[in-house]
Amino acid sequence: MVFSQLSFLYLFLPVVMLLYFFASDRARNVMILVTGLLFYAWGEPFYVVVMLISTLIDYTAGRLMDRYDDRDDLRRVFLLVSVCMNVGLLAAFKYSDFIFDNINALFGSDYTNPVLLLNKAINRIAPFGLNERRVELPIGISFFTFQSMSYTIDLYRREIKVQRSFVKFAGFVSLFPQIVAGPIVRYADVAKELDHRTVSTAGVSQGFERFAKGLAKKVLLANSIGTVWAQIKDTPFEELSAVSAWMGILAFTFQIYYDFSGYSDMAVGLGRMLGFTFPENFDHPYVSTSVTQFWRRWHMTLGGWFRSYVYIPLGGNRCSTGRNIFNLLVVWGLTGLWHGASWNFVLWGLYFGVLLIMEKYVLKDILPKIPAFVRRVVTFLLVVMGWVLFDTESLGAAGSFFRAMFGANGLISEDTGYLLRTSAFIFLICILLCGTLHTRLITSVRGFVSRKVSPKGMIIARTAAVTVLEAAAVILCTSYIIGSSYNPFLYFRF
């Protein structure tokens, strides 16, 4: 969440929640829509139009599919229009620079991206200040287009009923808690809650607790460990020692987890406060004992989306081995491309696709015989290797970083000791909190206290402790945000 979106929450969320709590269902849906549009426009005043176009396309396609329910040929046409228009928006705003850069590099041409011509025309009409050299990515476009498309695809499959209210449908697309960085919420996940949802003091309390937890993960952990990676990444990779390179990529490994899972916690918490139950997005992925398990625990809503709308329609695993391998490579190539318009991302996706194929067809009888601890360490290291491809600017840069990791520039440098001393504590905290150890400790302490304290006293003690921790977390995070210029949200660029 960029600073402008955070400032929106700080300024308007208390007022919105107060009005929302006492409003009717109809008024709440209007508030959800208006608040979502304002929240998005707070940081993207022009590109909110792109989101509205995507919303209008899918709402219209849905109404037409319902109107011509007995005409499968027409329903198929409406679905294709919806999918093609949404993919077209993604191609124009996310991939057009990448496409034209590669065409020009391949053929030695000098074609101009037509989206840039559109930007120039818009700038002449209105002072939006759109970039006329590179296409700016509307924040969260990959999330809200996938979210909106899920509606028309499920409607075509007759797995859901049509939504006749534009306000409700647009409110679903523009749900401000998760509109810009997920989790990806399918229409089926919230269809009933769009019609009626219960907003209670208990739900608000539980939601705020989850929001405070996510805010702390993002601001106190992701930002703190992220500064280590930012410092190392600024050093030319050809000068990095092996220890510095490993410290850097491990810092990014924890940064991206706490950044993205923190935002997901914030989104789930805000959704709960508003009466929605959003799907979970993370489940302690860094303690996985295989790459397959890792991807069942990391960004679970994206994995579910690709499984439902790409992998299974291609044939899934109910086909020959060769065809299944092809299906997996297609899905993981697209998964990489979803994350960004770069060959690094494509290779990152295919890297995991190959690892999953190896686990499924080559190592399936060997892996169960290896101790769980060894499998956990190997899986973690394979994931860390993948993050090098993910967060370097080019394949050449990734190659230089890999060489540094394995000692091409020496084992240790003069500033390595200083980095180790200054970042050891935050590394330790990140390691301890990324697994399940802390939850087991909390459960043990809670069990011990419950044996010593009456049930009523236990409830009072827990409520008091949670309230104090929530208040402390929010105050600390607010102070950090105000006092720090480093506050990136990594998944806003996807």
Image: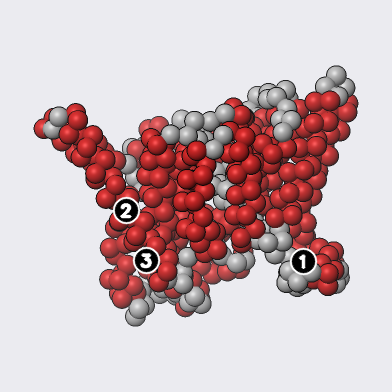
Residue at x 36%, y 56% (from the top left corner): 474
Tag 2: residue type?
A: Ala
Disc 1 marks which amino acid? Asp
Looking at the image, is mark 3 or mark 1 nearer the viewer? 3
Distance of mark 2 from mark 1, alpha carbons?
49 Å
The spot of residue 385 in percent (x, y) is 49, 56
Q: In the displayed structure, would residue 319 be above or below residue 216?
A: above
Which amino acid type corresponds to the residue marked 3 in the rendered image? Answer: Ser
Q: Secondary structure at mark 2?
A: helix
- Asked if marks 3 and 1 touch (Cβ < 8 Å), the reply is no
Q: CA distance from mark 3 to mark 2?
A: 12 Å
Percent across and percent down for residue 237 are 50, 73
Q: Disc 1 marks which residue?
A: 101
Q: Residues within 10 Å of mark 2 (few under 14, many from 20)?
A: few
What residue sits right under mark 3 in the picture? 479
**Callouts 3 and 2 close, C-beta under 8 Å:** no
